[in-house]
Amino acid sequence: MATSGTTVFENSFSIDEVIEEAYERIGYQLASGYDLKSARRSLNIMFQEWANRGLHYWEVDNNSITLVDGQATYTMFRSTDDGTSDATAVYGVDDVLEAAYRNSSSVDFPLTKINRSSYQGLSNKTDTGVPTQYFVQRFIDKVTITLYLVPGSTEAGNTINYYYVKRIQDAGAYTNVSDVPYRFVPCMVSGLAYYLSQKKAPQRTQELKLLYEDELQRALAEDGSSSSSYITPKTYYPNV
C-alpha cells in the first residue's frame, strides 16, 4: 500500500477549514457569513489566551539593538504607528527572554534580567558603561527595554543581542493558514469548538472544555527543546 509521502497538512489547513471542522464538532452547520466572522473572532481571542499558557517555543526569535550614546531605554515593539521612526522596534514582541551585550569583536557578555523594584533600587540610573542588567516593561501598545549601565560613547555602535517571544499572529484572511505548528492543530480545533459551543451549543460546553484542555496540555508538554538536566546536592565543608 502506498503512502502520501507528504507531511504538510498543517500548511494547507486554512482558517475556514479550521472553522468548519470546529462547527461540525458541535453539530452546527455554517448558515451565514456572520458565523464565519464570529468564529474567526473567537479563534483570535483563543490565540491571545494561549499567551497566558506559558512559553510557546515556535514563537521564539532573535534580534539585536544598536546602542546609542546616553540612551538607556529602547522600544522593542510598537503596536501602532505614532509617526516616529524607531529602527529598533520589531513587530509582535511580547517579552524578552534573555539578552547579552555584544562588543565590536562579537564577544557576548550575558545581561541579568531584573524587575521594576530592583531597577528602582539602583542609586544612580544615569551611570554609563558596559550594560550588565536590563529591565523590560510590557505596555498595552509597546514593549521597552531599559539598560543599566547606560551605554556611553565607548559602547555606542555595539549591540544588545536578545531572544524574545513573539505574539501568535492573528487569523487574518479565511484563506490563511494558522501561525501554529502541527502539534497544536488538534487543540486549536478542539479549542475553537469549545469557544463556539458557548454561543451555539451551551449544553456541550463542559464536555468540549475537557477535550480541549486535555489536548492543549499534551501539546504544551511536547513543545520545547529537549535537554539533559543534572541535579547535584550542595556539599558543605564545616570547620574549613
Image (tube, grey):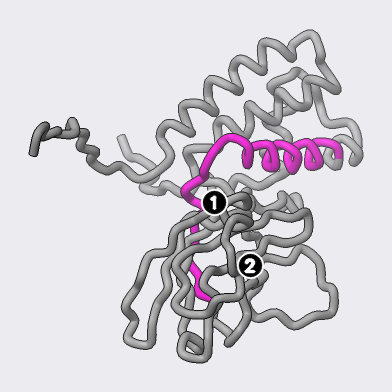
Above or below 60: residue 51 = above
Asked if the residue at tag 2 contacts the one at tag 1, i.e. Cβ–Cβ closer than 8 Å, the answer is no
Q: Position of residue 204 (x, y in %)?
A: 74, 11
Q: Is residue 10 visible?
A: yes
**Viewer-nearest of discs 1 and 2:** 2
Q: Position of residue 44 (x, y in %)?
A: 74, 43
Q: Quadrant of the N terminus?
A: top left
Tell me the CA gap for discs 1 and 2.
29 Å
Bin the neighbour count of mark 1 within 10 Å (Cα to Cα): few under 14, some 14-19, many 20 and up. Answer: some
Main SS, magenta region, reads helix
Q: Write down the residue under mark 2.
A: 76
Kind of residue indicated by mark 2: Met
- Disc 1, SS: helix
Q: Quadrant of the C terminus?
A: top left
- Specify whether 93 is left or right of 182: right
Residue 223 belongs to the span the image colors magenta = no
Please state which of residues 89 and 17 is positioned toward the viewer in this rendering: 89
Please name the residue shown 68% across and 54% down the image: 138
Q: Is residue 177 visible?
A: no
Q: Where on the picture, by quarter, is residue 95?
A: bottom right
Kind of residue indicated by mark 1: Asn
Bin the neighbour count of mark 2 within 10 Å (Cα to Cα): few under 14, some 14-19, many 20 and up. Answer: many
- Specify whether 226 is left or right of 197: left
Please name the residue shown 42% across and 68% down the image: 100
Please state which of residues 57 and 84 is positioned toward the viewer in this rendering: 84
Q: Which residues are magenta?
A: 38-65
Please name the residue shown 63% across and 54% down the image: 94
Above or below 156: residue 26 = above
Q: Write down the residue under mark 1.
A: 11
Q: Position of residue 24 (x, y in %)?
A: 72, 24
- Disc 2, SS: strand
